[in-house]
Image (cartoon, rainbow, N blue to C red):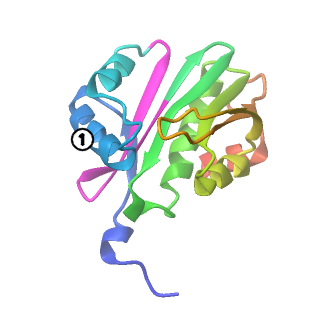
Amino acid sequence: MSAAPESHRAEVTVRDMTLDDVPAVEALERQLFPIDAWPLQMFLDELSQPETRRYLVAEAGGGIVGYAGLRCIEPIADVQTIAVVPDFEGRGIGSTLLTELIGEARRRWASEVLLEVRADNPRAQKLYVRFGFEQIHVRRRYYRDGVDALIMRLQLADTPGTGSGETTEAGNQ
């Protein structure tokens, strides 16, 4: 296998999303999810609720290459969004973002994490299964283009920072 292009080896950092990030994130959202993109105001509304929300961005090469968000109203956390720019897929960015969201759910004493994933997105489904999520339901024709949403759930341990070994190991890498 050949070495990754230089642009694919740039260091990736993950940090909390700020209001200044919203225009770039919203532009990525429109690019990545043209049919179901969140409007700018939705991101602004989400960031205005830190008592129940946490949003992250992944940066590389001076730009945002991924983002994710969690809503947690005890005892349930819900992954609101998670996305990685296609040129940066396969580099562990999605895993890092998901690890951070699961850690946040634990810190907020959630007993489970829920998410919806497109039925036609096997790459994302595989990631979630690797983290211990199980499909619990199907929402027929959930997305605007008629694709079903698979509802997935991860059961969490009762104590923050503990749980499945895979999640703990991913957080310690």
* Image: magenta residue range: 51-69
Q: Is residue 132 left or right of residue 21?
A: right
Q: Quadrant of the C terminus?
A: bottom right
For the point 52% across and 27% down, which residue is it? 70
Residue located beneath label 1 in the image: 24
Q: Amino acid at mark 1?
A: Ala
On the image, the x and y values in percent for residue 166 come to 73, 49
Q: Secondary structure at mark 1?
A: helix
From the top left corner, tell me how far across and down residue 71 is, in percent: 53, 21
**How far across and how far down the image is residue 120, in percent?**
60, 51
The verdict on residue 97 being magenta is no
Where 3 falls versus 75 (above or below)? below
**Majority secondary structure in the magenta region:** strand
- Report the residue at 34% width, 26% height from top: 43
Classify residue 107 by image quadrant. top right
Report if residue 67 lies within the magenta region: yes
